[in-house]
Image (cartoon, helix red, strand yellow):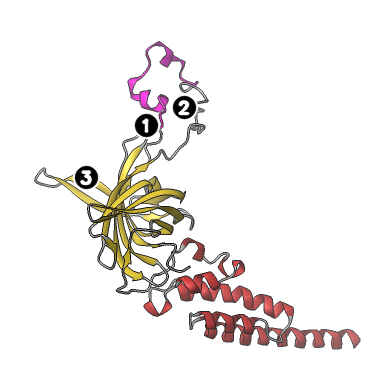
Amino acid sequence: RARTEHRSARARSLSCVMRCSVLALCATSAAALQVGPSAFQAARTVAKGPVSRAVAGASQAALAAVFAAALVSPDAAQALTKDTYNSLTYDQIKGTGLANKCADVTSGTGTINVGGKLNKFDELCLEPKEFFVVESKLDKKGNMQTEEIVGKMMTRQTYTLTGIDGDLSTDGGKVIMKEKDGIDYAATTVQTPGGERVPFLFTVKGLVAKGTSDSIKPGLKLAGDYVVPSYRTGLFLDPKGRGTTTGYDMAVALPALQAGGDDALFKENNKKYDVLGGKTELTVTGVDAATGDFGGTFVSTQASDTDMGSKEPKTILLKGSWTAHVPGLDE
């Protein structure tokens, strides 16, 4: 009888905890969906309410999921502003995918005049949202046509470039952005509808983008070229142990190659570090002159991986959003 009463009391306790968890989750979700610094503070207050530690832990985990669902929503009301992003803690961002997202710049008509102490930019973030593999094909009339094939992202949420800084200047009445340093490359792979996987190194290394006016304002377009390093580095070895600076010179299972060999395997054996190129166009759609934040959309075309010289590079087309910051205005 004592055991039965103990089990009944334990069941009632667990049931109470579950009900409290559901109520806390509902309250947390409602607060988080308001999206704003005050809403996040209210959500954290709810999570710290007078429930058990287990309930609070469950609420915090649910809170992070709600943040991801609410803030990644394409609805303008759910935009992830810079202030909101900076108000999030590590635990709220961890596992939600928000670390792979650039903050949104509120559309505005402000103007930033480049010059004097305003000669740098930082916090440049580029978030690709659409991926295409450009291929050339012959149509029925024998004419060469280019086709943009939609690619499915196969890489985990680590393909956004961020923390990039550089120089701002003017030349001939045109704004110039020169990239210098930061997390300016990301190994990425997309898959075409036919199942082919195309790896490429998403990057803006050495970007020099020239604008269409002498100040940063909505409507400004900046276009320029950048360098696309090899997807593989010198110490990489292929499945047969071949590489550039180390490994075998040729496939050891084919000793006949030493006596002339097969020309078709020359590219497979002759590994090289290819440095190719890319182009990008940045369009400014929003400027916050008070804080120095600006951003918009971008379109980039660049070469894919060549498997260290053994394959012809494909053309990758990327479309997405970007943001940057001019230090000095918010100090």
Are there few (<14), some (14-19), or many (20+) residues within 10 Å of tag 1?
A: some
- The Cα–Cα distance between marks 3 and 2, rounded to whole angstroms, is 31 Å
Of circles 3 and 2, the one toward us is 2
Q: Is residue 62 left or right of residue 325?
A: right
Between the C-alphas of marks 3 and 1, the distance is: 20 Å
Examine the structure image and report whether residue 197 is included in the region drawn in magenta: no
Label 2 amino acid? Thr
Q: Which segment did they paint magenta?
A: 252-274
In space, the residues marked 1 and 2 are separated at their CA atoms by 12 Å
> Residue beneath label 1, please?
310
Is 271 covered by the magenta stretch?
A: yes
Q: Which mark is residue 196?
A: none
Where 324 sits versus 255, above or below?
Answer: below
Q: Which residue is mark 3?
A: 136
Query: In what element is the residue under mark 2?
Result: loop
Side of 257 where 142 appears, left or right = left
Nearer the viewer's eye, disc 1 or disc 2? Answer: 2
Q: Nearer the viewer, residue 80 or 138?
A: 80
The x and y percentages for residue 104 are: 40, 69
Q: Which residue is mark 2?
A: 244
